[in-house]
């Protein structure tokens, strides 16, 4: 019988898993640095992404603080190429949303959406992944899970639960009245603030637990 490590793998398998993790972590570290330098990352997620990248056992693969958008979707409600007609990582005003809806340069199926935070993490062991899931679950977050596992590579998904999605334009036809859009903006801003509070709590907890 071959000797095994505490993870249940043989020493050779453990070394291979460790090497895989180091390679993947380094690749995502470089991707993060590039995204920051090219301003292709949500600015609100830079501090927590940098912190996680500096830990020995974790890295991020994708993050978003949450957003409010006017998005061009196809008939199956899937994103088209260049789908983000307007995008904000903050609360919005009625004026900027209404101007976006009435902008005649868009003739697709326009939806007004608010989406919650997204944080995709990687680590090297199921034990680490379970620790993160327990910590996040204790914050009251339910949309969490493991979406990939192989020795040395475990991916964790964390999603915010605050969201809304409403069709506002079809082709050149605006489907909503001004007063209704004002109420949609109020609701989207309320949900965004709730999402932001959850994000701040999540980031503070991860900094404590993953240090």
Image: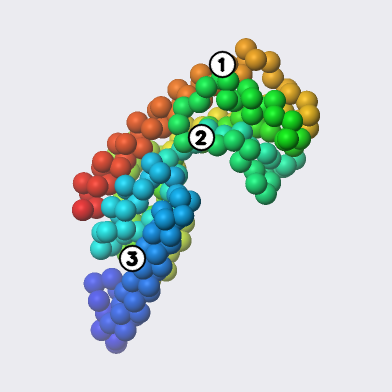
Q: How is the image coloured?
A: rainbow
Label 3 belongs to which residue?
A: 124
Q: Nearer the viewer, residue 156 or 116?
A: 116
In the picture, the disc for residue 183 is 1
What residue do we see at 21% from left, 46% from top?
A: 208
Q: Are marks 2 and 1 in contact (CB under 8 Å)?
A: no
Residue 135 vs 61, above or below: the answer is above
Label 2 belongs to which residue?
A: 88
What residue do we see at 55% from left, 30% from top?
A: 164
Q: Quadrant of residue 42?
A: top left
Q: Nearer the viewer, mark 3 or mark 2?
A: 2
Q: Position of residue 35 (x, y in %)?
A: 44, 56
Counting residues from the start of the chain, the first of labels 1 and 3 encountered is 3
Residue 107 vs 54, above or below: the answer is above
In the picture, the disc for residue 192 is none
Q: Is residue 184 left or right of residue 1?
A: right
């Amino acid at each position: 019988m071959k000797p095994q490590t505490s993870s249940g793998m043989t020493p050779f398998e453990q070394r291979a898993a460790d090497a895989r993790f180091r390679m993947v972590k380094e690749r995502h570290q470089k991707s993060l640095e590039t995204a920051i330098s090219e301003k292709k990352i949500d600015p609100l997620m830079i501090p927590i992404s940098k912190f996680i990248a500096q830990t020995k056992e974790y890295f991020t693969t994708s993050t978003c603080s949450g957003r409010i958008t006017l998005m061009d979707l196809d008939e199956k409600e899937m994103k088209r190429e260049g789908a983000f007609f307007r995008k904000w990582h903050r609360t919005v005003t009625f004026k900027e949303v209404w101007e976006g809806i009435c902008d005649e340069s868009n003739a697709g199926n326009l939806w007004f959406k608010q989406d919650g935070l997204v944080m995709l993490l990687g680590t090297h062991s199921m034990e680490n992944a379970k620790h993160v899931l327990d910590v996040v679950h204790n914050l009251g977050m339910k949309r969490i899970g493991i979406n990939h596992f192989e020795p040395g590579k475990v991916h964790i998904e964390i999603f915010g639960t605050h969201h809304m999605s409403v069709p506002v334009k079809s082709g050149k036809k605006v489907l909503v009245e001004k007063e209704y859009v004002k109420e949609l903006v109020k609701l989207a801003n309320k949900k965004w603030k709730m999402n932001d509070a959850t994000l701040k709590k999540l980031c503070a907890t991860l900094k404590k637990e993953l240090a």
